[in-house]
């Protein structure tokens, strides 16, 4: 009896997530039989303004806030890890800390919600559409008077300001806090570059607009020597603005859906 090969056997996939976040894609792709190369497009670092982060957290501790908004799992991790350090809390006590101060939380999607869950925090608002516009639409359903609500947006050192602009337009009291830095990786690993140049990489995934820009700058013309699969239409748009074709966009902005998109793309053309 001939043993059936896994669907991605003999396929090589490039994962461009930061090193400490790549496993969420790498493991399921390997389980599907793929050879996975990891080449981070951006490096995630602590905030360049730790005093500003600490000040925002102390204000929350003093009950000067109503809503915490997170645009990424990294924002959750850096914010709540620092909260634990600052007030000598165990991670599982973060939920109680927020509840005692009647703080509500909003996140852009399921991945960010899972990051909160690890700190024993259940988000109050998770949008149906996993982006800033979706979060604003979800908040509009539950916030009756923006002018009376104090929002703290914990975000990266760069990125879209759609959420902040929308909240200010609605008259809310908004504080924007840099929770972490996103810095471009400028030099690819030699193995990655060789694999890309030789056409070994059957598909590559890109999960953010910042990563898209960093990858094009890093690989230059070589970036076009593989099939690109994007986490969202926004990310795909960033690639295509730089004249890089995107083969497929994940149906949902989740890592699971991104893996499915890779599988579907590579099995369809087998």
Image: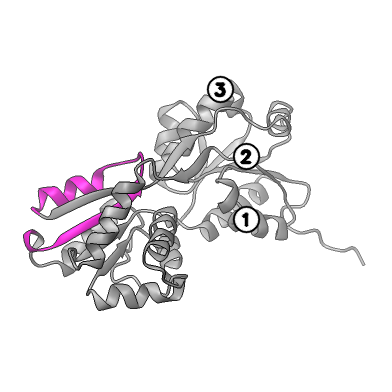
Height in image: 239 above or below 25?
above
* Disc 1 versus disc 3: nearer the observer: 1
Q: Earlier in the sequence, mark 3 or mark 2?
A: 2
Height in image: 164 above or below 141?
above
- Mark 1 = which residue? 23
Q: Earlier in the sequence, mark 1 or mark 3?
A: 1
What residue span does the magenta drawing correspond to?
A: 147-171
Measured from the top left, where is residue 97 in percent x and y?
Answer: 32, 74
Q: Which quadrant holds residue 107? A: bottom left
Height in image: 89 above or below 259?
below
Residue at the far right: name it.
1
- Mark 2 = which residue? 39
- Mark 3 = which residue? 220
Measured from the top left, where is residue 176 in percent x and y?
Answer: 24, 48
- Give the number of the disc on residue 229: none
Q: How far apart are marks 3 and 2 (CA)?
A: 15 Å
């Amino acid at each position: 009896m001939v043993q059936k090969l896994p669907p991605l056997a003999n396929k090589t996939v490039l994962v461009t997530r930061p090193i400490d976040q790549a496993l969420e894609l790498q493991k399921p792709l390997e389980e599907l039989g793929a050879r996975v190369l990891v080449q981070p497009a951006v490096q995630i670092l602590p905030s360049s303004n730790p005093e500003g982060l600490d000040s925002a957290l102390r204000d929350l501790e003093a009950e000067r806030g109503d809503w915490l908004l997170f645009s990424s799992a990294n924002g959750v991790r850096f914010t709540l890890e620092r909260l634990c350090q600052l007030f000598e809390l165990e991670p599982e006590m973060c939920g109680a800390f927020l509840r005692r101060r009647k703080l509500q939380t909003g996140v852009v999607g399921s991945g960010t919600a899972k990051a909160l869950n690890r700190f024993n925090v259940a988000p109050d608002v998770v949008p149906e559409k996993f982006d800033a516009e979706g979060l604003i639409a979800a908040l509009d359903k539950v916030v009756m008077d923006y002018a009376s609500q104090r929002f703290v947006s914990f975000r990266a050192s760069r990125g879209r300001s759609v959420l902040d602009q929308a909240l200010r337009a609605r008259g809310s009291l908004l504080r924007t806090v840099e929770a972490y830095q996103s810095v471009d990786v400028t030099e690819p690993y030699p193995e990655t570059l060789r694999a890309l140049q030789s056409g070994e990489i059957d598909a590559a995934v890109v999960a953010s607009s910042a990563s898209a820009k960093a990858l094009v700058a890093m690989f230059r013309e070589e970036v076009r020597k593989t099939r690109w699969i994007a986490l969202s239409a926004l990310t795909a748009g960033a690639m295509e603005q730089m004249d890089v074709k995107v083969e497929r966009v994940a149906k949902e902005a989740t890592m699971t859906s991104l893996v499915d998109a890779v599988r579907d793309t590579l099995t369809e053309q087998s």
